[in-house]
Image (cartoon, rainbow, N blue to C red):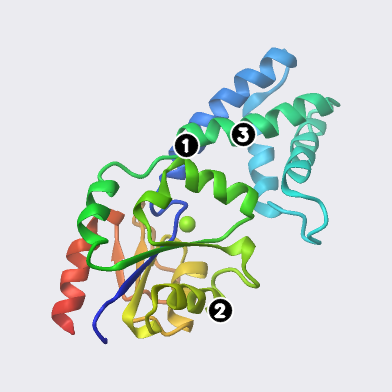
Amino acid sequence: MSSLKAIFFDLDNTLVDCRTADIRTYEILSILARKKQVNINTPQLIQCFQHLLIDVPFDPEGIIPVHPWRTGLWEKALHNQEIDDPILAEHLDTAFHSERLAYYTFIPGTQKMLDTLLPAYTGVIITNGDSEIQRPKLAACNAGKYFHHIVVGGEEPFEKPDPSIFYTACDLAKCCPDEAIMIGDSLKADIQGGLDSGLAATIWVNPENKEMPEQGPIPHKQVVSILELPSIINTLEKDN
Ligand SMILES: [Mg+2]
């Protein structure tokens, strides 16, 4: 590879442990739901909402804004238990986003690593998702303090894995694709996109040591945690 100039980072489940943030948030939401509906089955409510959130996180037609859309998902999850309570659905949507932000911090040790790494390289976050959801998360973890540039998928013509969003990051970092690397937990978005846009290397964050699917993109490197990045970069620079 050419000499490394920029590092592109995914946000959710790469820089921030969203799974832990979600567990804490759902505990709080369950208490809130039970206060209003004493007979509710909260594990079922949460599970139903999670399924809906994975299936249709945003209005596929792009008409309904994200908060009314997700309030609708809570309404559906409540209807699943024959509960008709639009006010509770609205409270759950508001609480889901505000409570989660309280737990939205970088994985311990990340700030220190970035302080040593990013004077030498240009750091860019490329995160998919709606601006209304991603911008408050970025503010909660103080991303602007550490990274030179931030690119939000929902504000771009196309999200990851489309190469165009990686080229936008290259333009901001004033580098060519083969002078940048991408690190992220999603094979479909981060690794596929990094490969398709011709980046120098792709690094897959795989904390649960999942098996690599037989089909699909193959990352250059695999790590358990973002904290392995400095030593991976040393290896890449040596291979150069
Ligand atoms: Mg991610």
Q: Earlier in the sequence, mark 3 or mark 2?
A: 3
Gap between marks 2 and 1 measured at Cα: 30 Å
Q: Is residue 50 above or below residue 240?
A: above
Amino acid type of the residue tagged 2 in the rendering: Ser
Amino acid type of the residue tagged 3 in the rendering: Phe
Q: Quadrant of the N terminus?
A: bottom left
Amino acid type of the residue tagged 1 in the rendering: Ala
Label 3: which secondary element: helix
Q: Residue at x 65, y 25 (%)?
A: 42
Q: Residue at x 37, y 74 (%)?
A: 219
Which disc is residue 21 wearing? Answer: 1
Q: Is residue 77 above or below residue 28?
A: below
Q: Position of residue 228 (x, y in %)?
A: 23, 58
Label 2: which secondary element: helix
- Circle 3 sits on which residue? 96
Which disc is residue 164 wearing? Answer: 2
Is label 3's Cβ within 8 Å of ligand 1? no
Q: Earlier in the sequence, mark 1 or mark 3?
A: 1
Mark 2 surroundings: few (<14), some (14-19) or many (≥20) residues within 10 A: some
Mark 3 surroundings: few (<14), some (14-19) or many (≥20) residues within 10 A: some
Q: Nearer the viewer, mark 3 or mark 2?
A: 2
Which disc is residue 2 wearing? Answer: none
Mark 1 surroundings: few (<14), some (14-19) or many (≥20) residues within 10 A: some
Q: Residue at x 25, y 45 (%)?
A: 109
Gap between marks 1 and 3 measured at Cα: 10 Å
Q: Position of residue 234 (x, y in %)?
A: 16, 70
